[in-house]
Image (tube, helix red, strand yellow):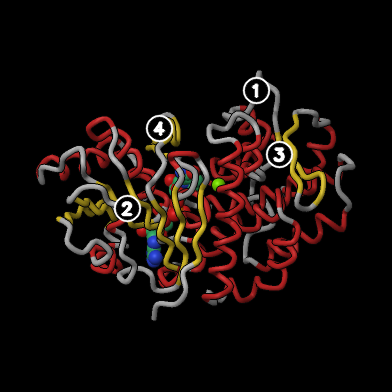
Amino acid sequence: MRESVLELKVDLGDRSYPILIGQGLLGSQDLTPYVAGNQVMVVSNETVAPLYLEAAKACFPGKQVDTVVLPDGEKYKDWQTLNRIFDALLERRHTRKTTLVALGGGVVGDMTGFAAACYQRGVPFIQIPTTLLSQVDSSVGGKTGINHPLGKNMIGAFHQPEAVLIDTATLQTLPPREVSAGLAEVIKYGLIRDEPFLSWLEGAITDLVGLQPEALAEAIHRSCACKAEVVALDEREGGLRAILNLGHTFGHAIETFAGYGNWLHGEAVGTGMLMAADLSVRLGLIAPADAERAGVLIGRARLPEKAPAGMTPEDFLTLMAVDKKNVDGNLRLVLLRALGDALVTSDVKSDSLQATLEAFCG
Ligand code: NAD
Ligand code: MG
């Protein structure tokens, strides 16, 4: 049953938008106030559509609602699949007044947002994220795009949605590994910016893993608030927004080594954050007990705590050297100066880095 709605604003001047969070909002929340014209195109995938497409359509009473259902998977985040959205829009004669709606995880969200940024030089869109990761991360902030065979997320645009609708009830059907992967990004917000939230998470982690609705709503609300705040301060990643990459440089190396899809992004970020915390201890930034606290929480979120079997420190160094966040060939890392306070630095002693890599490999 529908309960209360938590509302949060992403403050971006005349492009500000609300995030609506609650249990059972899908189907009961009227989203027509966020639709300027009469046409709506709901984009989903073959996993999510059978579960939630009908309820999503019911959010737009009185509108012409068309749908396009894409194949499921990161490997379909490409030009060919993107083009199916344009085909559907043109076949159904959608005009510049149409509104696109992304119903699914981050893959559907990124593709639909990018389609909206391009169609007829830009039309509005609404995000209805259905994975924990997309609810706390990808649906907020306006980064949209697709992959290129030579690089992930290499083709894209900044395009902010009109609104984000988060129904925590959709998480009940999410596979447990995907829940844990989303929790990694939730824990990240506590680690980089919000120590009280981190303490709250330590008490709530069992409820979160068990998908308890009130705990989920609170965690999502505070995560979105944190991301919204960082994005409002630095929409185009000039500086501060980089702290959102805590654990991601190590994590990307793990994802690449394991082969995309074998480790989920959030799983790799979980281990990556532990590595960042460990390195922060070695550089004298935080106490060993702080890294220990992060480790316990990440373990209780059922995230892996070691690099993949067979991965060596040399593998890390090779893979991190090609990371896109490197500036002028220097390795730039997000580290912790306290729990709840991150910094971006290229001042990393190579023997400390080596010691961290050794501690997490083998
Ligand atoms: P995903 O979209 O692939 O979803 C994971 C799986 O869960 C898929 O199989 C999906 O069909 C399924 N699913 C979705 N909702 C479900 C539900 N309620 N019940 C059952 N199954 C469900 O993966 P993701 O983790 O949501 O997103 C990853 C993508 O997001 C990547 O492409 C990444 O690049 C992108 N991303 C973008 C940003 C951004 O700022 N734009 C930030 C982080 C990640
Ligand atoms: Mg991430």
Q: Is residue 260 visible?
A: no
**Disc 3 or disc 2, which is closer to the eye?**
2
Confirm or deny contact between disc 1 and disc 2 (CB under 8 A): no
Q: Which mark is residue 276?
A: none
- State the quadrant of the N terminus: bottom left
Q: Residue 157 carries which label?
A: 4
The answer to whether 132 is drawn above or below residue 261 in the figure is: below
Three-letter code, disc 2:
Tyr
Q: Residue 169, position in %: x, y?
A: 43, 72
Give the distance between the C-alpha atoms of the residues marked 2 and 4, in whole angstroms: 21 Å
Q: Which mark is residue 334?
A: 3
Give the distance between the C-alpha atoms of the residues marked 3 and 2, in whole angstroms: 37 Å
Regarding mark 1 in the picture, which secondary structure is present there? Answer: loop
The answer to whether 112 is drawn above or below residue 118 in the figure is: below
> Quadrant location of residue 44?
bottom left
At a point 71% along the width and 39% down the height, the residue shown is 334
Count residues near mark 4 (Cα–Cα under 10 Å), then give few for <14, some for 14-19, many for 20+.
Answer: some
Three-letter code, disc 3:
Val
Residue behind mark 2: 34
Residue behind mark 1: 327
> Quadrant location of residue 342?
top right
Name the N-terminal-most of marks 1 and 4: 4
